[in-house]
Amino acid sequence: MKIPASRHRCFLHCCCWVFLLLLFSLTALFPAIAAKKAKTAKIQPTVTPIEIADEAVWQMNYAKADSIYSSELHHNPCNADLHWKMARLQVSLGESLPKGNTDARMLHYRQAAEHARTSITLDSTNAKGHTWLAASLGMMADKIGTKEKLRRAQEIKRELDTALRLNPNDATALSMLGSYYREAANIGWFKRMVGNAFLGEVPKGDYTLAEKAFRKAISIDPKIIRNYHELALICIKSGNKEEAITLIKTALDKPILIESDKRRIEEMHALLKKLTKE
């Protein structure tokens, strides 16, 4: 059947209008899509240099972290947060060196203490400044005399108490407090009596308090290997071998975040082998 020419022209005319309307709709849609993409791009969070340095610390890229923190401190020397972060970095740098390299390790720990004290001077209400001062003092404790150790132990405990008063959920301070109580609990009553008589007050330890601190630290940040290791040692001391094994196995599945984790992993493998043979 042949379509009349007039109807054919009408059909073509309508098709042209439909095509133009469709073209117009698509053209109008593209700017809307572009605007939406632009809006999405604008709300993307900006990563700051300090956040990049923080991540570098946990990746154990200490050179990168040091470069960024130092640059930021040059432009903002009165930033309390930057100083405690530098203290944390210096402790990590010291820990990354071989045990025999005592002088270099002590240099990093002294620098850590200086940064932590500066952080406290700038803002005494910042818990992290007190936490990392305690950490740096603790790391320096191995190579000093007995009287100095006792004096420093009192300062460490005071700084940890201050940190936890300011922030009861500071997982790092809780972890160090647990170690403080565990180490002090290893001092027998006779040694404590002799120490009090001739050297001054000796730290008082308690395995129950140590266990409580480590369990809370794990509940706040379950990634940290040292807390499982230290708590496992307490469990072994109290005769709870099964939980010690569970804690060690859990720790061995955690990521390595600091250099000392590598040493702890070796120790835990040996300890696990011993416990499973008994």
Image: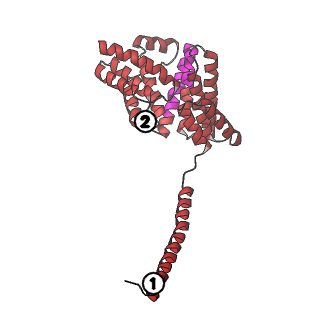
User: Looking at the image, is mark 2 or mark 1 earlier in the sequence?
Assistant: 1
Decide whether residue 176 is among the magenta residues.
Answer: no
Say what amino acid the circle numbered 2 marks.
Asp
Q: Position of residue 13 (x, y in %)?
A: 49, 83
Picture layout, residue 31 above or below residue 269: below
Which quadrant holds residue 72?
Answer: top right
Q: Residue at x 62, y 36 (%)?
A: 83
Picture layout, residue 74 above or below residue 271: below
Majority secondary structure of magenta residues: helix
Q: Position of residue 253 (x, y in %)?
A: 39, 28
Label 2 and label 1: CA atoms lie apart by: 77 Å
- Residue named by callout 2: 221
Q: Residue furthest front?
A: 1
Of residue 62 and residue 146, the one placed in the foreground of this image is 62
Instruction: Give the position of the C terminus as an image quadrant.
Output: top left
Q: Residue at x 40, y 18 (%)?
A: 269
Q: Residue at x 40, y 19 (%)?
A: 268
Of residue 66 and residue 117, the one placed in the foreground of this image is 66
